[in-house]
Amino acid sequence: QVQLQESGPGLVKPSGTLSLTCAVSGGSISTSNWWSWVRQPPGKGLEWIGEIFHTGSTNFNPSLKSRVTISIDKSKNQFSLRLNSVTAADTAVYYCVRDGSPWGQGTLVTVSS
Amino acid sequence: EIVLTQSPGTLSLSPGDRATLSCRASQSVSSNYLAWYQQKPGQAPRLLIYGASSRATGIPDRFSGSGSGTDFTLTISRLEPEDFAVYYCQHYGSSFTFGLGTKVDIK
């Protein structure tokens, strides 16, 4: 049974870079699935950030595309998110997800000085 | 970009009631690439329905999805206590967007 686990700093300074990693266990990341990042500001709805295939192909939310990088490390069976030039509006719970399921438990990232 | 409008914003019902949630797309959803998720406080969303009407693994048959084109519906035939939650629809495929959600709470 595939499981996903997010990790990374819980606090990022404004104008800095948010970096998160999603470790995939119980299965290979090199499958015919897309691996995505989704975020949810406190008390608000869900926002899709972007996705990556094991070949390295990516798709991004147009509203975030200029600030987002998603990469994959098949040797470590994980994929990562980088979001630069962050502001308080980027404060959210960040989830990684394989296609629609399963989801990681989520990690709260707060942007604050 | 496809915009998804969910209604109502909140649905107040009792256990045993039937719940009908709506998701309307601003343009036709290709190949019925429409999913429904359930989210409880402090938890990650859980996939309920994909392809507009296919139940995900392990989802009880009281949950059903229907619709095509621009109008989609999630129906919960008889609400169980654990079904009170927020429900999101999502378009996926060429682009990905979520609706703002419908909260199903206890009347």
Image: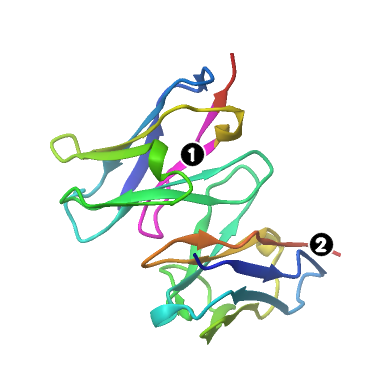
Mark number, residue A94? 1
The residue type indicated by label 1 comes to Tyr
Residue B2 part of the magenta-drawn span:
no
**Is B62 drawn above or below residue B2 in the view shown?**
below
Respond whether the residues carrying marks 1 and 2 are from the same subunit.
Answer: no
Residue that carries the numbered disc 2 in the rendered image = B106
Viewer-side residue, B62 vs A16: A16
Q: Could you tell me which quadrant the C terminus of chain A lies in?
A: top right
Residue A22 in the image: state x and y as whole percent: 33, 37
Q: State which region is magenta.
A: A93-109
Residue situated furthest top in the rendering: A113
> Which residue is pictured at 54% across the width and 80% down the height?
B65
Q: How far apart are marks 1 and 2 (CA)?
A: 28 Å
> Which residue is pictured at 59% across the width and 68% down the height?
B4
Q: Is residue B47 left or right of residue B86?
A: left
> Label 2: how many residues lie within 10 Å, few (<14), some (14-19) or many (20+)?
some
Looking at the rendered structure, the secondary structure element under dot 1 is strand
For mark 1, name the chain. A
Residue B106 in the image: state x and y as whole percent: 81, 62
Residue B79 in the image: state x and y as whole percent: 70, 72
Q: Is residue A105 visible?
A: no
Residue B9 in the image: state x and y as whole percent: 76, 64
The residue type indicated by label 2 comes to Ile
For mark 2, name the chain. B
Q: Is residue B47 visible?
A: yes
**Is A4 drawn above or below residue B2 in the view shown?**
above
